[in-house]
Amino acid sequence: MIISNVMGGLGNQLFQYALGRHLSLKNNTILLLDISDYNTDSRKFELHNFNITLNIARQEDLPYSKRKSNTNKYKAYIYDMLFSKLKVRHEQFFHFDPTVLYYPDNTYLYGYWQSEKYFRSIEDTLRRDLTFVNRLSKEQLHLEERIKTENSIALHVRRGDYINHMLHPTCSLEYYTDAITIITQQIPNPIFYIFSDDIEWAQRNLKIRHPHQFITNNNAITDLRLMSACKHYIIANSTFSWWGAYLGSFEKKIVIAPKKWFNDTVNYSIRDLLPKHWIKI
C-alpha cells in the first residue's frame, strides 16, 4: 500500500493525492489517505468532492510516529526507521525529485510534492479522478455554463492569510495590472471572473475595463469548480488557483503566474512548480 499524508488547504490536498495516486498505480497497490491532521486543523478535508475512491487510513495502518497512542515521538521515529515495513518518506526538496517516482510499495508519503512532474504520466487518469461531484445551485450551474461559452478569464486574488505570512507574500497590484494587459492583448472579447478571499480589496483596487464579475458567497470547492470552467487564467502564488488553472480543459488556455512565489526569507526553488507553457511575470 501507499499512504499519503493529506494536510493543508485544498490545493495542497490535490498535490498530495496526485503523487499518491501515481505511486499506487505504478506499484499496483492500494492508495490510503491519512487525514488525521484534520482532527486538529481548522481547514477541511475536501477530496470527497471529487470522483475519487476514498480509502482512509486507519490508526493501525499509520507509522508508529503518527499514531495517537505514541506519546514518545522520538522512540516512535526510531522504530519507524529501523523496524517498520512501512517506510516513511519525507519530502527532501521543494523542487521535483525524480527519485520519488521510484518509491516502492509500503511507502508513507509526507510532504507537499508541488510539481506536475510527479503525476504528468497519469494526467488522463487524474483528470477523471478530479471530476467535480459537488452539487451546485441552479444559479451556480447557469453561471458555470455561461463561463464555458465565453472567452472567460479567471483572476484569483489571495490575501487573507497571506497578508502577514512568513513564507508567502501577496501578489502586488502591479502584477495584476501587467497580467491583465498581457492577457487582453491576446484574448478577444474577454470577460473576467474574479475569485478572492478578500473580495472588497479586489473591488476597490482592480481596474478592469472589460466586462467582469466578482464571484462571491461560495465555498472553496465551488470556487475551484467555477474557476476550472474558465478558458484562461491569472493566478496568484497559491496552489488553489494553480489547480484551478491546471484543471481547466480549454486546449489553448493561457495561464499567467507570478514569478515571486515566496518571501525572500526562504530559498525555495520554484523551477518545477509552474508548467513550462505558463507565462511567468
Image (cartoon, rainbow, N blue to C red):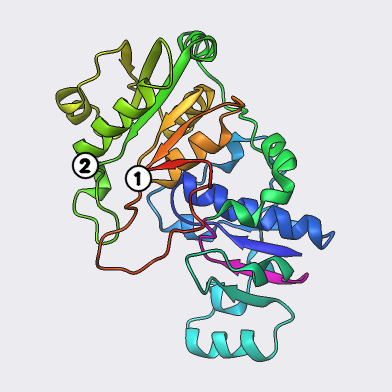
Disc 2, SS = loop
Left or right of 112, for residue 40: left
The vertical placement of 86 against 170, above or below, is below
Q: Earlier in the sequence, mark 1 or mark 2?
A: 2
In the picture as drawn, the residue positioned furthest to the right comes out as: 28
Separation of marks 1 and 2 at Cα, in angstroms = 10 Å
Q: Which residue is mark 1?
A: 258
Crowd tier of the residue under label 1, counting other residues whose Cα lies within 10 Å: few below 14, some 14–19, many 20 or above: many
The vertical placement of 267 against 186, above or below, is below
Asked whether residue 274 is in view, the answer is yes
As for residue 105 lying within the magenta part, the answer is yes
Q: Quadrant of the N terminus?
A: bottom right
| Magenta: main secondary structure | loop
* Kind of residue indicated by mark 2: Ser
Disc 1, SS = loop
* Most foreground residue, 40 or 229: 229
Question: Are the residues flagged by discs 1 and 2 in contact, CB closer than 8 Å?
Answer: no
Residue located 56% across and 30% down the image = 248
Q: Give residue 83's position: percent from left, percent from top.
A: 70, 89
Q: Which residue is mark 2?
A: 172
Asked whether residue 44 is in view, the answer is no
* Most foreground residue, 9 or 278: 278
Q: Give residue 202's position: percent from left, percent from top.
A: 22, 28
